[in-house]
Amino acid sequence: MRIYQRRTGGNFYYDIHANGKRVQISTRTKNVNHAKKILALRMSEAERGVFEKQVSVPLADLNKQYMEHAKTHKRSWVRDEQMLGHIERIMGPVTLKQITPLRVEEYQRERLQEKVCPATVNRELAVLKHELNLAEKWELRQGPNPVRMVKFLREDNLQLATLSEKEERLLLKHCPSYLQDMVLFALNTGLRCGDLFDLRWEEVDLEGRRMARLMQKSKQMLKVPLNEVACEILTAWATQRKCPYVFYNQLTGDRFRDLKGSLKKAVKDAVLEGITWHIFRHTFASRLVCSGVDIVTVKELCGHSHISTTMRYAHSNEEAKRRAVALAGSCDRPGTVIPMERRTRA
């Protein structure tokens, strides 16, 4: 049992006998002391009969196995599939053994260079971390999880991008008519794009001016009233109803699948930046808070599962806070006044 280098300055390898076979494996380190520690650990495993040679599993193969698991156990498996697509695209055709803490940090930097927000990068790494934990459970890899050794990026949850009224007018001016209606409906209901695309007429009560929809993400029922703008849009689309969905593609006669391209073109034509579908939801919640709507009502209108999610918009309520503080000093009951002479002495 020994350690050796196949070439000068290269990684050290160890040579041991385990399960009746001779095994030669790279320690993946050029540090002789670290290599000796790895050899001692593998010798201990061989003596206890628990040594197993690591299998070199491609990340792409693990992704496929993970998605089969996610489709069975997770509601948000579609989002997981999208995130794993980004990970596989940037990391390339790597094996699980090649995913090191350094490679994970390089992934962080490369994603930030694509102007992706830190929160998105953190969610992607969280999926990779969970996936590698499962790989260990499934005996597809051994050793510490490399993602666990990497510090996640700092998130500034108070900096939620919203649309100003000027930006809204400019964007709508450059949208085709169908996109205008859908953007306005999102701004006045706060629906996520998936729920907007899936909205059916059976979920809308035009006469009662309300909407009841099972939210795609939380799987909770959202029952909210509709304002004048939302009702006008629905009334207009009701006159040309041709399928079960409220908003449909007039070319295909079916629901919209994706409008990222149309929105991106409108944003570019309006000479704006950083506008995505989710910004309309942020804008809806932020405008409610700025108008003095209490945070619990905002939570219910947005369909948030937890109040902590809604609290991200509390910083927008500066004017309401000023009104509240003013009310605190409006009581007619006389208070205790300290004489000027005593205050001076103090």
Image (cartoon, rainbow, N blue to C red):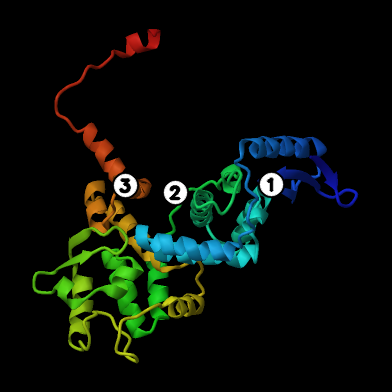
Would you name the residue on which mark 3 appears? Answer: 319
Residue 157: which disc? 2
Q: Amino acid at mark 1?
A: Gly
Crowding at dot 2, Cα within 10 Å, few <14 / some 14-19 / many 20+, comes out as few
Query: Which quadrant would residue 326 be assigned to in this image?
Result: top left
Q: Secondary structure at mark 3?
A: helix
Q: Position of residue 311 (x, y in %)?
A: 33, 46
User: Which residue in the structure is indicated by mark 1?
Assistant: 20
- Mark 1 or 2, nearer chain start: 1
**SS label for mark 1:** loop
Distance between mark 1 and mark 3 Cα atoms: 76 Å
Mark closer to the chain start, 1 or 3: 1
Identify the residue shown where x is 42% and y is 81%: 174
Q: What amino acid does circle 2 point to?
A: Asn
Q: Is residue 247 above or below residue 48?
A: below
Q: Residue 242: x, y in percent?
A: 22, 89
Residue in the picture at 29% in, 13% down: 339
Packing grade of label 1 (10 A; few <14, some 14-19, many >=20) is few
